[in-house]
Image (spheres, rainbow, N blue to C red):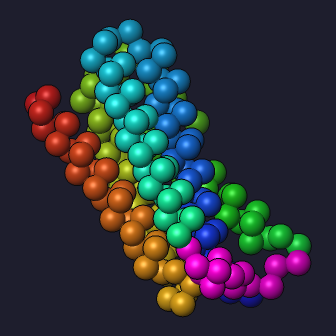
């Protein structure tokens, strides 16, 4: 069976990814001893919060058609698959799935990690875009990609400012 997703399910995943990223940055900020690193982490958490609000607003604006299930899923397998995808791809702000920041990283390193993680999120959303049929909200998924690309631009600007 081919699994497809509607825009509501994709936004649910995007929201979880952004929530996790913001929580990670806040935890890292608590551990950071350098004031500049701490502020950078706090700023990154705020950016993630902004994306979360954007995605929540976009999700609220979905039509009932865009929220329609696209797959017969009596055993809730699509929801479990979505959860697994979000857990495995939601690494924004992390060095990797099992590695956490030590608090000793330079601001430049933190920004590079964040940029790389954001790039991974863009790849994730581009892959999801192809799973969402046009009639159930593909344009909304494209908007997520645009938001994430904007996030990368902000991070690159911050990185350039400290070099």
Q: Is residue 130 left or right of residue 64?
A: left
- Residue 93, horizontal then vertical, whole percent: 44, 38
The image position of residue 62, as x and y in percent, is 56, 74
Where 118 falls versus 27 (above or below)? below
**Residue 102 sits above or below residue 100 on the image:** above
Residue 25, x across and y down, in percent: 46, 31
Label tally: 0
Q: Is residue 71 left or right of residue 52?
A: right
- Of all residues shown, which one is farthest toward the bottom? 135
Query: Image quadrant of residue 106?
Result: top left
Front residue of this view, candidates 150 and 126? 150
Looking at the image, which is closer to me, 55 or 153? 55
- Image point 55% across, 65% down: which residue? 59
Q: What residue is rendered at 52% in x and 32% in y?
A: 24
Question: Quadrant of the image for the N terminus?
Answer: bottom right
Measuring 17% from the left and 42% from the top, which residue is drawn there? 157
Mark yes or no: residue 73 visible. yes
Q: What span is in magenta?
A: 62-74
User: In the figure, residue 9 lies in which quadrant?
Assistant: bottom right
């Amino acid at each position: 069976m081919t699994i497809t997703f509607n825009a509501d399910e994709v936004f649910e995943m995007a929201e979880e990814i952004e929530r996790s990223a913001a929580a990670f940055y806040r935890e890292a900020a608590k551990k950071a001893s350098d004031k500049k690193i701490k502020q950078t982490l706090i700023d990154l958490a705020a950016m993630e919060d902004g994306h979360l609000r954007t995605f929540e607003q976009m999700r609220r604006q979905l039509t009932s058609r865009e929220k329609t299930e696209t797959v017969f899923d009596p055993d809730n397998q699509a929801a479990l698959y979505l959860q697994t995808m979000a857990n495995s791809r939601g690494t924004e702000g992390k060095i990797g799935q099992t590695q956490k920041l030590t608090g000793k990283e330079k601001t430049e390193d933190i920004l590079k990690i964040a940029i790389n993680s954001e790039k991974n999120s863009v790849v994730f959303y581009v892959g999801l875009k192809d799973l969402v049929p046009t009639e159930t909200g593909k344009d909304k998924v494209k908007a997520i990609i645009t938001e994430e690309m904007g996030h990368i631009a902000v991070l690159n600007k911050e990185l350039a400012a400290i070099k």
